Amino acid sequence: MSETTRHSYDVVVIGAGGAGLRAAIEARQQGKRTAVISKSLFGKAHTVMAEGGAAASLGNVNSDDRWQVHFRDTIRGGKFMNNPRMAELHAKESPQRILELEHWGALFDRTSDGRISQRNFGGHEYPRLAHVGDRTGLEMIRTLQQRVVQLQQADAAEFGDAEAMLRVFAETTVTELLLEGEPGAEGGRIAGAFGYIRETGDYVVFEAPAVVLATGGIGRSFKVTSNSWEYSGDGHALALRAGAALLNMEFVQFHPTGMVWPPSVKGILVTESVRGDGGVLRNSEGSRFMFDYVPDVFREHYAETEEEADGWYADPASNRRPPELLPRDEVSRAINNEVKQGRGSPHGGVFLDVSTRLPAEEIMRRLPSMHHQFKELADVDITAGPMEVGPTCHYVMGGVEVDADTGASSVPGLFAAGEVAGGMHGSNRLGGNSLSDLLVFGRRCGLGASAYLDELGEERPTPEAADIDRLSEEAAAPLGRETGENPYQLHQEIQQTMNDLVGIIRRGNEMEQALESLDKLRERVAAVRSEGGSVYNPGWHLALDLRNMLLVSETVARAALERQESRGGHTRDDYPAMSAEWRAVNLIVSLRDGRLQLRHQPIDAMREDLMELFEREELGKYLTEEELPPAPRSDG
Ligand code: FAD
């Protein structure tokens, strides 16, 4: 029989990746009693897997860089669908957040004059990614954890208890948010969170007026993905069931370069730094095919010949960028097409070669993890020959609709930061912009939650007791069933459906088919059975995650079917062009009486001073006539 323990905090942060830790640190620094919960071991989050770096316009390698250029690149990368206020805050505040991380002990790679080194990445005009070899996320998490410990040591000295103000609950999974009042109803607000402890199977109730979602993405709903097991879209689903809205869930990023061979490692990421550091893409005919795929909107910024592209690495002022460094959506589609046209590599990808571009020792210095990964997993030496790569589901741009400044969702007391939040990256995220997003908006969420508490004063919402009993019963249900399907089988079917029917290239009839399949799967998932008991039982854990994966998959498929254009991480075979009318629309999904509802909402307009960062001609490629600023008057 499982026990239920209860805790009470001011702020509960769900997720201990970059966004969660930065939010928790801020809430604690604001004097709030804070809990951080992570489904995996403390320190194991996607943030730790990040390789290339964190984008911030420090201007250390090219002094022309500044926040306005970073803002412009981010908006171009997102194809003008980004929340402009988020993109502005991100571009302005990223340098401070990186320097703060350094102040807390992060050891970034250095320029020859001792400043934080910055590397090139797709879609960034200047070298902008602060990095630590190809293990940047590891250093980021190490530093944030060290900051947590530092704060706990201060609390030990002050209160005689290191966990008095900030406590980590590792291997604890939240299955539902607790509310006072009804989800989506007037007066409904956050009262805490409910979950289970993986090691013991016991239940746990966190009472808290403010909850920050920092649970990351949804990649585990797709068969080929760079994401690990904890990305089952829990935060997205928790937010929906609590009455919050999700924004633009159709935008899913397929990273162009995942491993394609051997099958057991298909999807594992090959960092964009390989291309940033000079790696080139070739098809089976030896052609550097990316030159054939530069879209009109980007043509003036990218090289037309190999000579110019190669010249850019040494002399970026006189040459344009290589097309391998186009935003990810463009490169993924190009690879997909090359393979489809029969010009792929033996295992269904294309070739990515850095061995002919850099000396072996330089590759080992700059890309040690990639060297290790290919040697160990595929028996390929990347200093001596090319890698085989192909697109892999990597990141979700859609997420919880939040206020840009505070991270607040539409449900009082519920906040979201990091990959689970939507808006910042528009229809396509630039590489490196996630790590800086986590720091900027993690901090802002910590501040937002603290300000919410200050407004509440002494008053505290109480979770409904009946809800807690119901949630324990629901969680235990898969263990008590005599019949029912195996959760691993159901998971595979969700992944296959999303991969085949709502993947990198989408068609209306296929997405309708996907929605039918997901609908049928819902009944089967509701009756899932897991063998064994509640003590450290991954089958049971997966059975509980399936409900979230299914709900999130449905939001992606519904929104993708609705958006009749191609833009960023949403490519439709039946609507191949971008449409200015669709750009002006955010797709908002919410859950009412157990059913998903989808509505159109006008996109936030960009302020005039931000609009002035772009030429009118460029704006004309994206915006409707009504949105365009007035044309300058000619006196002639
Ligand atoms: P995560 O870091 O994933 O943290 C999520 C946390 O939530 C985890 O602690 C998890 O256990 C917890 N959690 C989830 N569900 C629950 C639940 N129900 N209950 C309790 N806890 C829960 N971005 C860049 O900017 N630069 C890069 O170089 C880069 N490289 C990448 C390389 C790889 C291989 C991958 C996969 C991603 C990369 N990204 C990169 C993207 C970036 O790493 C992620 O977008 C980012 O780390 C997400 O951070 P987060 O804090 O939102 O979530």
Image (cartoon, grey):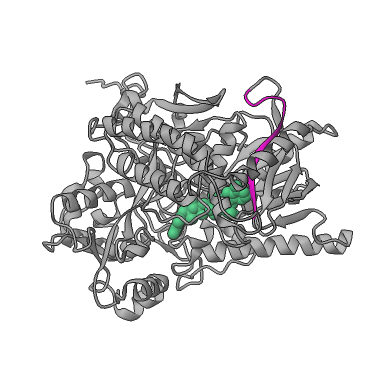
Q: Name which quarter of the figure residue 565 lies in.
A: top left
The spot of residue 622 in percent (x, y) is 31, 31
Residue drawn 37% across and 55% down?
126
Residue 178 lies in the magenta-colored region: yes
Query: Which residue occupies the extreme left position in the image?
Result: 285
Query: In front: 73, or 231?
Result: 231
Q: Is residue 132 above or below residue 617?
A: below
Residue drawn 72% across and 25% down?
181
Q: Is residue 382 above or below residue 303?
A: below
Q: Quadrant of the C terminus?
A: top left
Query: In front: 500, or 563?
Result: 500
Q: How many marks?
A: 0
Q: Name the side, left or right, on which 226 lies relative to 505.
A: right
The spot of residue 218 in percent (x, y) is 47, 46
The spot of residue 250 in percent (x, y) is 39, 36
Query: Which residue occupies the extreme front position in the image?
Result: 482
Tell me, yes or no, if residue 88 can be seen here: no
Query: In front: 482, or 199?
Result: 482
Residue drawn 46% across and 60% down?
53
Tell me, yes or no, if residue 257 can be seen here: yes
The spot of residue 14 in percent (x, y) is 64, 47
Q: Name the side, left or right, on which 422 lies relative to 163.
A: left
Q: Is residue 362 above or below residue 290?
A: below
Q: Name the side, left or right, on which 65 lies relative to 233.
A: left
Magenta stretch secondary structure, dominant: strand
- The segment highlighted magenta reads 172-184
Q: Name the side, left or right, on which 302 lies relative to 328.
A: left
Residue 582 lies in the magenta-colored region: no
Residue drawn 55% across and 44% down?
234
Query: In front: 590, or 405?
Result: 590
